């Protein structure tokens, strides 16, 4: 996938993920964005070859939540 398509997909997924973080954790939007961008999940999500961008925002939230609670991420098998 070319870089522009990948960035476009991330630009669709990230706002949805941030919205779920706001709803589930009660963070402000700014705090939710900051928490996401500082996470290992986001670092991995930015790498196209991991294919995490193909997962639903809810699945990504569950991975984000697990990282926040345990410091670890369980990646779906695929």
Image (spheres, rainbow, N blue to C red):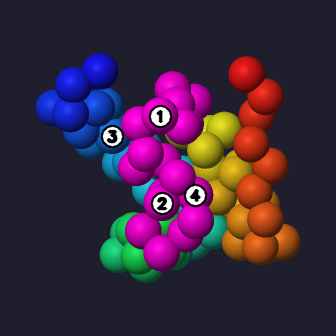
Dividing the picture into quarters, in which one does residue 40 lie?
A: bottom right
Of marks 3 and 4, which one's residue comes earlier in the chain?
A: 3
Instruction: Provide the residue designation for mark 2.
Output: 43
Q: Secondary structure at mark 4?
A: helix
Hey, which quadrant is residue 65 in on the image? Answer: bottom right
- Please, is residue 2 above or below residue 44 in the view? above
Q: CA distance from mark 1 to mark 2?
A: 12 Å
- Residue 18 locus on image (x, y percent): 44, 56
Residue 10's label in the rendered image is: 3
User: How busy is the neighbourhood of tag 2: few (under 14 within 10 Å), some, or many (20 plus)?
Assistant: few
Q: Are marks 1 and 4 in contact (CB under 8 Å)?
A: no
Alpha carbons under labels 3 and 4: distance apart: 13 Å
Rounded to the nearest whole Å, what is the CA distance between mark 2 and mark 3? 12 Å
Of the two numbered discs 1 and 2 on the same chain, state the one appearing first in sequence: 2
> Label 3's element?
helix
Nearer the camera: disc 2 or disc 3: 2
Q: Position of residue 15 (x, y in %)?
A: 35, 48
**Mark 4 Cα-neighbour bin, 10 Å: few <14, some 14–19, many ≥20:** many
Considering the numbered disc 2 on the image, is that residue within a helix, a strand or a loop? helix
For label 1, count other residues whose C-alpha is less than 10 Å away and answer few (under 14), some (14-19) or many (20+): few
Magenta residues span: 37-56
Magenta span has 48? yes
Main SS, magenta residues: helix
Determine which residue is flagged by label 4: 41
Report the residue marked by disc 1: 49
Crowding near the residue tagged with mark 3, few <14, some 14–19, many ≥20 C-alpha atoms within 10 Å: some
Residue 3: in sight, yes or no?
yes
Mark 3 vs mark 1, CA separation in Å? 13 Å
Q: Locate residue 76 relative to residue 16 in the image: left or right.
A: right
Give the CA distance from mark 2 to mark 4.
5 Å
């Amino acid at each position: 996938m070319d870089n522009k398509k990948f960035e476009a997909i991330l630009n669709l997924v990230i706002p949805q993920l941030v919205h779920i973080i706001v709803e589930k954790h009660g963070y402000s939007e700014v705090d939710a964005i900051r928490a996401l961008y500082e996470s290992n999940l986001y670092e991995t999500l930015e790498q196209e070859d991991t294919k995490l961008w193909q997962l639903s925002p809810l699945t990504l939230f569950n991975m984000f939540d697990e990282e926040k609670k345990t410091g670890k991420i369980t990646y779906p098998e695929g």
